[in-house]
Image (cartoon, rainbow, N blue to C red):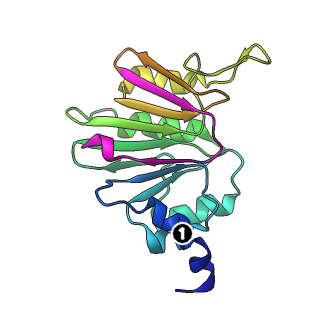
Amino acid sequence: MNGALFKHSRELRSYSCGDVKAYIFIGAPRIPLHQVSAFLRNFHVVTSKCDDIYVTKTARSLGILLDANVVDLGNYLIAGVGGVDPWHSILRLRELLRNQQGKRILLFSYFPAHGLCDSIPELGVRSGLPELRNLIDEVKPYVFVSLSSLDCIVHYNETEIYSISKNTLFLDLRFVS
């Protein structure tokens, strides 16, 4: 094990659990992506608006970028909206998820959807994307998870909305079995 990987091995081992179908990072992890991919299988990254283009390029080259992509997990599909151009992700996902009958969609986003756990109480404004709310209305995901300025759980139509106030989020998807 090289020095850089050894430095992060304790954190990587904490992610490595037995029966996990996928690992999702919303925002790039603190560990370099090529080191994570050498240690973990089935992990994906939804980039943030603050991530360097290097993160996007590296994640794409490793096949782990979830922005504007869909990954099939059997009865479930995971999809992501992120990066500096979330509108591209939304347009592409609208096409990819259009005819997915019989599969539950798990949608992950760096950005909140307009009107769904997106308020910034200190400023009295909403920070969510209306286009993302429209995508949720169209594809009706089973679960939508985003980052936000506050922790929030809401049931909206047929979708469970989870909004979490952390910069980088690690999710273990054992609950989807």
Decide if residue 113 is on the left or right side of residue 119: left
The range drawn in magenta is 159-177
Nearer to me, 17 or 135? 17
Residue at image position (60%, 34%) is: 111
Up/down of 56 relative to 146, above or below = below
Along the viewing direction, whichever of 5 and 144 lies nearer the viewer? 5
Viewer-side residue, 121 vs 127: 121
Give the left or right position of residue 114, taking residue 69 as reference: right
Q: Is residue 39 left or right of residue 47?
A: left
Q: Is residue 134 magenta?
A: no
Quadrant housing the C terminus: top left
Q: Residue at x 37, y 44 (%)?
A: 78
Up/down of 162 relative to 172, above or below: above
Q: Depth check: give the residue in front, 144 or 67.
A: 144
The residue where tag 1 is placed is: 10
Residue drawn 63% across the image and 40% down it: 166
Which amino acid lies under the numbered mark 1 shown in the image of this protein?
Arg
Q: Residue 59 location in percent, x, y?
A: 54, 62
* Residue 175 falls within the magenta-colored stretch: yes
The kind of secondary structure element at disc 1 is helix
Where residue 75 appears, x then y in whole percent? 22, 42
The answer to which image quadrant residue 43 occupies is bottom left
Residue 106, compared with residue 35, is above or below; it is above
